[in-house]
């Protein structure tokens, strides 16, 4: 809102109004505002949660230090949501389609997580919101995001296409440009559902290739494939973040690392000069997502002030589902969803540890009459707890792995 106010005042030569037109300035203001909200307002929210006795009910899993977490305020995800939404509303361009989608994702999954926590805390039902309702909510968000990206005229991609002898006659000579090396190229804008394949030269994947068998009907069927892919990504990443939220600061710190990486990718993808230099997909107006990334980073780091070991507050599903959903939608919007297995490798390992543990237990129980386990306990961070590793050491090492994966993700822009 401040952005739109100063955009209006700039036409009257209002002193300082032009500062808010710069992406870097607004991103800095967003990070600062988000940190202030999460650290100052967050303290008051934690106090309110204490007064309302909204505490965590911890199951006895035989883990060291587990009893000390009993009664720690939960639903702290409210702090994260407020620290993201308020700065974005203040400093982002609210007419930008990508910002609108990110706000919808934040509200949507934040509400689902809140309902789950509300049922656990106030209705005293440890199961919380039924799993099928969570999945329905995630599918609903995937539909909204997928259909919007596919159908909206505001969603465009600009590609640099090199002109060769083979394709010279396919393009108008009036559109052709010459780069510093003397090579011909054109800039083409379109709405095709493309994404980026890591470590591959000319690394663009068209979802329509998955329906090649339909021939001339491929363009009419591709939206189904694209929307299904978005639904799967949103569901998988949001649940992965939820499973990772088991140790003090683990999910929060991991999300902050991922947020920084996504912010860099959005900045590069939305900038015509850098996307041209790196020969990556240019997504007009995607640079505005740097503002959202700034709020996301500020919110997670600020929340980490209270969530680091020993935690004064837990985010609950209010925070974990929202964080995962935000990461998923953000990656899809900037066409980097195939980088998720690398960037969100911590979430992936946590999820697979649960899948493997449950699958192996059921299979061995069917064969041998009693279930056997691969890990001492899943998700895998509890496995290391069972082995006697201190909680802070586990969390710090997972962060280090997350940083390594983030670096690899950025490196994929050049190594092909």
Image (cartoon, rainbow, N blue to C red):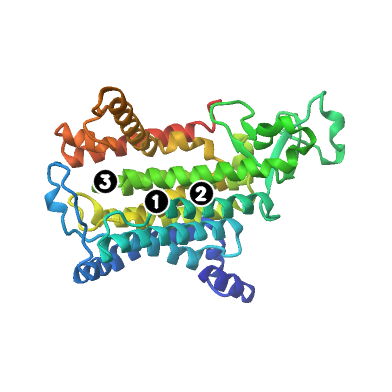
| Element marked by disc 3 | loop
- Answer whether labels 2 and 1 touch (C-beta < 8 Å): no
Q: Identify the residue shown where x is 58% and y is 52%.
A: 143
- Where is residue 259 shown, x and y percent of the image? 42, 47
Q: Identify the residue shown where x is 71% and y is 28%.
A: 181
Horizontal side of residue 324 vs 173, given as left or right:
left
Q: Nearer the viewer, residue 202 or 15?
A: 202
The residue to which callout 3 is attached is: 246
Q: CA distance from mark 3 to mark 1?
A: 18 Å
Q: Identify the residue shown where x is 66% and y is 52%.
A: 155
- Answer whether labels 2 and 3 touch (C-beta < 8 Å): no
Horizontal side of residue 21 vs 211, given as left or right:
left
Looking at the rendered structure, which numbered label has been put on residue 131?
1
- Answer whether labels 3 and 1 touch (C-beta < 8 Å): no
Vertical placement of residue 14 versus 348, above or below: below
Q: CA distance from mark 2 to mark 1?
A: 24 Å
Looking at the rendered structure, which numbered label has been put on residue 45?
none
Q: Is residue 260 visible?
A: no
Looking at the rendered structure, which numbered label has been put on residue 330?
2
Q: Is residue 285 visible?
A: yes
């Amino acid at each position: 809102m401040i952005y739109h106010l100063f955009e209006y005042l700039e036409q009257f030569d209002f002193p300082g109004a032009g500062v808010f037109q710069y992406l870097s300035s607004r991103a800095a203001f967003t990070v600062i505002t988000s940190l202030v909200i999460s650290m100052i307002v967050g303290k008051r929210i934690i106090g309110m949660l204490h007064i309302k006795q909204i505490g965590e009910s911890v199951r006895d899993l035989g883990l060291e230090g587990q009893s000390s977490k009993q009664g720690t305020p939960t639903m702290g995800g409210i702090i994260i949501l407020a620290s993201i939404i308020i700065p974005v509303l203040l400093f982002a361009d609210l007419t930008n389609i990508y910002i609108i989608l990110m706000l919808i994702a934040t509200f949507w999954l934040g509400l689902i997580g809140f309902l789950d926590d509300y049922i656990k805390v106030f209705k005293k039902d440890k199961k919380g919101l039924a799993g099928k309702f969570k999945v329905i909510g995630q599918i609903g968000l995937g539909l909204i995001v997928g259909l919007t990206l596919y159908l909206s005229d505001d969603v465009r991609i600009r590609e640099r296409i090199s002109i060769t002898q083979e394709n010279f006659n396919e393009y108008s000579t009036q559109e052709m440009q010459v780069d510093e090396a003397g090579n011909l190229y054109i800039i083409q804008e379109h709405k095709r559902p493309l994404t980026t394949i890591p470590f591959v030269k000319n690394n663009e994947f068209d979802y329509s290739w998955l329906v090649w068998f339909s021939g001339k009907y491929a363009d009419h069927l591709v939206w189904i494939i694209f929307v299904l892919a978005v639904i799967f990504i949103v569901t998988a990443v949001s649940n992965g973040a939820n499973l990772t939220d088991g140790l003090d600061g683990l999910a929060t710190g991991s999300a902050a690392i991922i947020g920084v990486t996504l912010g860099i990718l959005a900045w590069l993808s939305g900038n015509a000069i850098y996307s041209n230099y790196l020969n990556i997909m240019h997504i007009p107006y995607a640079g505005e997502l740097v503002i959202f990334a700034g709020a996301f980073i500020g919110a997670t780091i600020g929340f980490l002030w209270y969530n680091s070991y020993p935690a004064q507050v837990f985010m609950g599903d209010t925070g974990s589902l929202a964080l995962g959903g935000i990461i998923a939608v953000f990656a899809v919007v900037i066409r980097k969803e195939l980088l998720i297995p690398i960037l969100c490798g911590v979430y992936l390992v946590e999820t697979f540890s649960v899948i493997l543990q449950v699958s192996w237990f059921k299979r061995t129980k069917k064969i041998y009459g009693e279930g056997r386990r691969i890990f001492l306990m899943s998700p895998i961070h509890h496995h290391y707890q069972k082995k006697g590793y201190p909680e802070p050491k586990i969390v710090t090492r997972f962060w280090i792995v997350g940083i390594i994966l983030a670096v690899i993700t950025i490196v994929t822009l050049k190594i092909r």
